[in-house]
Amino acid sequence: MIEIQQNKRIATCVVCPSVVGQQLALSDENRMAEAVGLALAINLDVVYSETLRMREIKPAMFFSHGFTEKLKPIISEKNIELMVVDTRITPIQQRNLEKELKIKVIDRTALILEIFGERAQTREGALQVELAHLTYQRSRLVRSWTHLERQRGGAGFLGGPGETQIELDRRIIDDKIVKIKKELEKVKKTRDIQRGARRKVPYPIVALVGYTNAGKSTLFNYLSQSNVMAADMLFATLDPTMRKIVLPKGMEVILSDTVGFISDLPHELVMAFRATLEEVLNADIILHVRDIANPDTAVQRDDVLQVLENLGLKNVKYAANYVEVFNKSDLLDESELLHWKNKTSGSENVALVSAVSGEGCDKLLKLIEDKLTSEFIECRVILLGSDGKTAAWLYENSRVTEVVNGEKADVYTVSLSADNFSRLDNMAKDNDRILIRK
């Protein structure tokens, strides 16, 4: 972990390597902006940054000896204490760079883990981040520390030369990983219970997903009238948040805000946050919030879809419950706005909005409601005599649009899902005071 002293910002340099022949989705400029944004997200002081074009990767230090020699006077002049390499480097390369430059060196994965570690607010979030940290740390034990050749004496009948320090460290980490996974399994069971309780109510789940800083939390706040942290920084949201909202015709749903995705999202984090992201897997509607003011919005879209696929949602972009929300329309000029309006025209799977001004949000809510009710069955339910229990069930499990009270019977006009209609039909078969008319 990076030790950040209070009221002191660590002078940092950021290097974005670009290897000849290596296909990169983001442009060099946007890669650097994102890397610097990640560093600023944990209050690092970026005093130097460089995009480095390389012919090849050097096995020993990743960079060439000439580049490290060039960096040394810059490090000295600017009192740099930390170097961020915007790619994944091996433990050997990290150790050799630290020995050569005499400063702390971390890669992109470690930086993202640091951000998550700082942002986790709930017990569950902290556990997930710790699991990701340990998984990452375990993969970097081999020959990465100077003390690993030490041995400790054996005990009992096995004896022998003893347990090497690296074996001991790996065992300690493995024990911690097992313990955390057990605790997260309890969290998963709790979530399953909560999910089951919501199904009984039931409230449909509408999950917000998207690239980090796409405006998910701002949209969440506008739709739910909440005050979840929303800032112009990467990974402002980490712990999932849920609120109940009411759609235009009175239907109630649960809106869920999730952690943002990013290109080259560490595999350790995807797996660690699987319990949280299961809300997305079980969502009735998935709202993919996109920052259309970003030049790399198409690349960001592909990165999000890749993470969703890794979670088990295959071909999600073709799913009936998938909606793309083109956000930040307020940042577009007239020609760009016209372009995106044309893309949304006549489509039932896209919406153009500004989460800041609220423009387009009413249409988005109607689109959500139309999708949720497209498979609904509308019918009239006649309750002969007083039947408060069935009436309560109708209010809980269907959308009641009209009630006509009579002397001998009450008539409810309702729309409900196919599953709930089947339940109601079974209730009518067992109770001759319930009549259903389509």
Image (tube, rainbow, N blue to C red):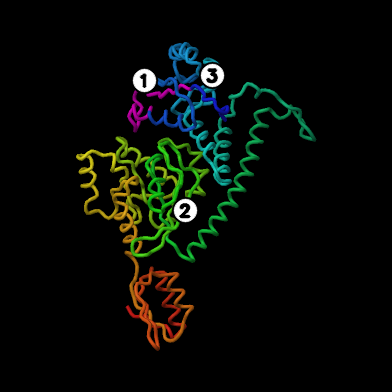
Which residues lie in the magenta part? Answer: 12-32
Query: Which amino acid, by three-letter code, is at mark 2?
Result: Met
Residue that numbered label 1 is attached to: 53
Residue that numbered label 2 is attached to: 242
Give the vertical position of 35 relative to 239 (above or below). above
Closest to the observer: 391 or 17?
391
The image shows residue 88 at horizontal and vertical percentages of 47, 29
Q: Residues within 10 Å of mark 1 (few under 14, many from 20)?
A: few
> Element under label 2?
strand
Q: Is residue 84 magenta?
A: no
The image shows residue 86 at horizontal and vertical percentages of 44, 27
Give the vertical position of 58 relative to 409 (above or below). above
Q: Quadrant of the C terminus?
A: bottom left
Residue that numbered label 3 is attached to: 103
Reading the chain from its start, which is encountered first: label 3 or label 2?
3
Q: CA distance from mark 1 to mark 3?
A: 22 Å
> Element under label 3?
loop
Disc number lying in front (1 or 2): 2
The image shows residue 42 at horizontal and vertical percentages of 49, 32
